[in-house]
Amino acid sequence: MKIKQIEIVDIHVPGRSATTKSRRSSWLSTTQKALPLNKYSEFSQPGVNMPGYDESPLWVRITSEDGTCGLGRCGYGSVTGSMIEQVFIPLLIGRDCFATEFLNDLMWRANQRLGVEGHATIAQSAIDLALWDLKGKLLEQPVFRLLGGPCREKIQTYASTDDLDWALELGFTAFKISNPVHYDDGIEGLNRLEEKVALARETVGPDAELMLNPVMSYNLAFSIQVAERLQPYQLSWLEEPLPPANLSGHQKLKEAVPWLPIATGEDHHGRHAFARLIENHCVDIVQPDICWCGGLTEAVKIYTLAEAAGLQTSPHIAASTPYGQHFSLAMPECSRAEFWLASDPGIPLSESNNLPGMAVPVDGFVTPSDAPGFGFEIQPEWITPKAAR
């Protein structure tokens, strides 16, 4: 079955009227951002635009010669579209849509001068995911069966949120909180961070899993100080404390704090970036983002590298996308999945989900749709081709 058309599209899901009133605004409206640019105070406040961190989605629709369509998505839509239009579309049109390994290799080879660990790989993710969705629909199978079938009945999730009271009410038993400080904040920042973590531990109790997500806001020295200061609170892991390019820093951090698991990977793109982390014993939990790392084909390769090294894979926001849910259901060494809890407290998850066909967690567990492909229930009339750039 040949690829007939590849398009960048807009998806407009009709609005639904919420039947429940929120109790307050989500934690995102008041939380100080934690990203490398927060070194400078003008970029660290809630609601401030941070150039370079545009995560707006870009959707791709791939149509086979029999008219069946698959949908894929990536982030950073303002810059990834040109890669898809100028490189991937002319490269892939007319090829066998089932040949995902071959098509993945074509895209990697085309990427070598275009940022193989940057935006080119993010763009590749949307194409690859649309191909898997298309394959599932053509074979009338959910993607998790194409990956080998389910290895568990349901996926244990953890909530990424500072609204811990709401997450507890929803039935979550594991939690990841945001980071309020930068390494430039020094001792004052350490004190403020410890106060936040201590309150979080008190809120969720001594038996709950609790993680901290610095999002590349630390350097090596500050990461070690944080690990030592927070040792009494028994964190399950420290996530992405350093920028992805700092390989030696990751090595030294793992050596300096052997008691604290280090998780990272959402901003590492492609199997080669993860191979370096794994081969140099820098990481305990690998966290590819399936919409950024190169797609599902690449995520499986990353998983295999990690599994061979005895490491777990916990993809970035896996429980918040159909792509991550299908991956997590099929992979044995993927025992917990992240759910990005950003909706206002009091609004049921079923009302805040705006992606038809995607399951949401119930009492901390989620099971993806068993409909063909990724189970999207997006109607054709909701999809319109995006104007060429």
Image (cartoon, rainbow, N blue to C red):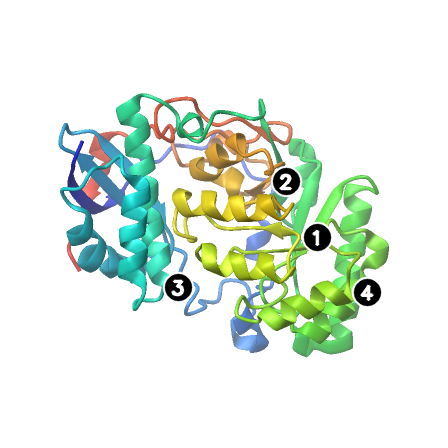
Residue under the point 26% across and 29% down: 379
| Mark with earlier residue (1, 2) | 2
Q: Secondary structure at mark 1?
A: strand
The amino acid beneath tag 4 is Glu
Question: Which image quarter is the N terminus in?
Answer: top left
The percent coordinates of residue 287 (x first, y second) are 55, 50
**Residue with the mark numbered 3:** 118
* Residue 173 position in % (x across, y down): 71, 36
> In 3D space, how far apart are the residues under numbered discs 3 and 1 (Cα atoms)?
26 Å
Residue 51, by quadrant, is: bottom left
Label 2 secondary element: strand
Q: How busy is the neighbourhood of tag 1: few (under 14 within 10 Å), some, or many (20 plus)?
A: many
The image position of residue 343, as x and y in percent, is 53, 43
Between the C-alphas of marks 1 and 4, the distance is 13 Å
Q: Nearer the viewer, mark 1 or mark 2?
A: 1
Q: Mark 3 or mark 4, which has the lower sequence index?
A: 3
- Identify the amino acid type marked 3: Gly
Which of discs 3 and 2 lies nearer the camera? The answer is 3
Please report the residue visible at 28 percent of the width from the left and 33 percent of the height from the top.
134
| SS category of the residue bearing label 4 | helix
Q: Residue at x 66, y 67 (%)?
A: 251
Find disc 4 in the rendering and name its residue: 228
Give the residue furthest to the right.
232
Query: In the rendered structure, which amino acid carries the disc numbered 2?
Result: Tyr
Q: Going by the image, does 320 lie left or right of 181?
A: left
The residue beneath circle 2 is: 158
Q: Residues within 10 Å of mark 4 (few under 14, many from 20)?
A: some
